[in-house]
Image (spheres, rainbow, N blue to C red):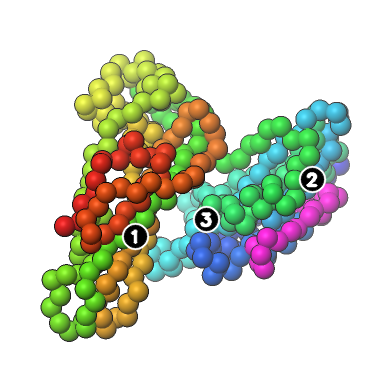
Amino acid sequence: MSDIRAEDEVVRICQELIRIDTSNYGDGSGPGERVAAEYTAGLIEEVGLAAEIFESAPGRASVVTRMAGEDPSASALVVHGHLDVVPALREQWSVDPFGAELKDGLIWGRGAVDMKDMDAMILAVMRDLARSGRKPKRDIIFAFFADEEAGGEYGARYAVDKRPELFEGATEAISEVGGFSATIGGQRTYLLQTAEKGISWLRLVAHGRAGHGSQINTDNAVTRLAAAVTRIGEYKWPIELTPTTRQFLDGVTELTGVEFDPDNPDRLLDQLGTVARFVGQPCRTPPIPRCSRAATSTMSSPNRLRPWWTAGRSRASRNTCWRSCGSLPVPVSRSATFTATSRLRSRLPETWWIP
């Protein structure tokens, strides 16, 4: 039996993962996860487990291994993480985002929170189990996916669609978040996630008159669209409480003595500190502008511009993300078009006008 314990190597594993740049830009231009997948597979195989690396596209690699349990007839558990990270601009960091510097008792770097820290914890515990010879009660499938930060099409989605045999017999899965501690009303509390935020992509298109950048253009698609995006972003969506959210807020009231007021939700949410940013979202359906595109050069004014939006909503009745299953036209002026998914149609105003 090895004297190495999980806590002895978890920091090193986390640092080495962070130092592998796996930035996911969402357009396939990033470095991919192959190097990180090979590093992960090496750690798995080093303790005698078999690791399988597979790619959904060049460089978009995931890793899966299975640890046999005592009871082969029992259902298997999937413990999974993701190897990609959101991009980091070095000039906006006080440290190298891929340096994994140990400072003030903390590891600093992109992925230190989401989620190479948990990847490292999973790997360290898995390696400790393998070295000790202890067997879990049931099979545990450890998976490290690509592309989580851009929707999972090249990672978890691909694995489920193309490699379902890797997850044979699995009935449950555990991954990041799900529950964490917070101080509410002076007491340590543990939050339990019961749903996953749903998303629906919306597209708003504005039209104007194209022209040379040196000329005044009062029919400018950019300014028209910017005004429309501002109005949508500042729209105050109504409070809608699911039974799960209502139960949680009642629990906060019990701890703090502050009642929830639908006309002034911030009074109770302020009791939650930074957790309020997560808890406040399920009370509304917020539109979040993500990006814009225009067919233009730096020397001309575009005649067409469109932003992409995410409209999200936590749904207590399910724990999987849903996407648009169809679009429904909304009446607009002749200068713009806007489509909204039918699932969100009832929450949108009747008309989005772009004057």
Please rate how many residues cluster around mark 3, counting C-alpha atoms within 10 Å: few if below 14, some from 14 to 19, many from 20: some
Q: Which residues are magenta?
A: 43-61
Query: Please, what secondary structure does the residue beneath circle 2 have?
Result: helix
Which callout, 1 or 3, points at the residue further toward the start of the chain?
A: 3
- Tell me where residue 73 appears, x and y as whole percent: 85, 28
For residue 150, which numbered disc appears in the image? 3
Query: Please, what secondary structure does the residue beneath circle 3 have?
Result: helix
**Circle 1 residue:** 307
Question: Does the magenta segment cover residue 245?
Answer: no
Frontmost residue, 338 versus 302: 338
Report whether residue 226 is seen: no
Q: Quadrant of the N terminus?
A: top right
Which callout, 2 or 1, points at the residue further toward the start of the chain?
A: 2
Q: Quadrant of the C terminus?
A: bottom left
Residue in the image at 41% along x and 63% along y: 93
Label 1 vs label 3, nearer the camera: 1
Report whether residue 160 is seen: yes
**Circle 2 residue:** 165
- Tell me where residue 208 appears, x and y as whole percent: 22, 69
| Residue type, label 2 | Glu
